[in-house]
Amino acid sequence: MVETQAPAQSQELQFPAGLFGFPDVHRFQLVDVPGAEGILRQLVAADGQAGLAFTVAYPFAFFPEYTPEIPDEELAEIGAPTPESILLMAILQVPAKLQETTANLKAPIVVNTKTLQARQVILSDERQPTKARLFRS
């Protein structure tokens, strides 16, 4: 079972391979977004990249049918966690019109909640979009 929400307190996540486009940033703080009920959080760079932050969401809150298959070799990179100790997050693109917010379901962030090691993974499943609308109009 994959966790749907992060631990209650802010935590520092370690990304040994960085994020796609940011390979030299290895540490991020996972910070609560006030009023977001633990569904939205900020991933804030802790490696001297001032101002580098991403809004992330727990995809199951918006996409209950989301069932990504994370390859075993990707899980091994973060310590081969058990299914119970995996947390998935999706990076959001939040434009000026909030109702146009999208989630990248093709490249989720996978976190080992025991070690706080994390990795962004590109899924081979072509059905997973890079820009899934959070709000249906």
Image (cartoon, helix red, strand yellow):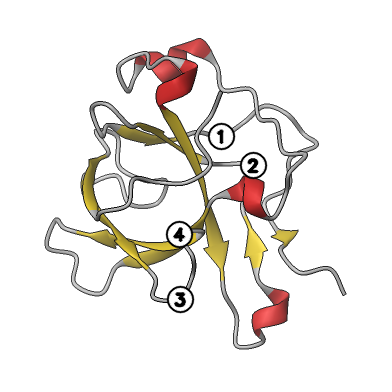
User: Which quadrant of the figure has residue 52?
Assistant: bottom left
Residue 25 at least partly seen? no
**Total of numbered circles in the picture?**
4
Dot 3 falls on a residue whose secondary structure is loop
Q: Is residue 65 left or right of residue 42?
A: right
User: Which quadrant of the figure has residue 53?
Assistant: bottom left
Label 2 or label 4, whichever lies nearer to me, is 4
Q: State the CA–CA distance, disc 1 to disc 2.
A: 6 Å
Mark sitting on residue 35: 3
Whichever of callouts 3 and 1 sits on the residue coming sooner in the sequence is: 3
Q: State the CA–CA distance, disc 4 to disc 3.
A: 8 Å
Dot 4 falls on a residue whose secondary structure is loop
Q: Residue at x 73, y 44 (%)?
A: 64
* Quarter that holds the N terminus: top right
Discs 3, 1 touching: Cβ within 8 Å: no
Counting from the top left corner in percent of width and height, residue 43 is at 34, 59
Q: State the CA–CA distance, disc 2 to disc 4.
A: 22 Å
Q: State the CA–CA distance, disc 4 to disc 1.
A: 25 Å
Q: Amino acid at mark 1?
A: Ile
Discs 1, 2 touching: Cβ within 8 Å: yes
Q: Is residue 88 left or right of residue 22?
A: right
Few, some or many residues within 10 Å of mark 1 (<14, 14–19, 20+): some
Q: Nearer the viewer, residue 17 or 134?
A: 134
Q: Nearer the viewer, residue 63 or 100?
A: 63
Which residue is the site of mark 1?
122
Label 3 or label 2, whichever lies nearer to me, is 3
Residue 103 at least partly seen? yes
Mark sitting on residue 22: none
Q: Nearer the viewer, residue 129 or 56?
A: 56
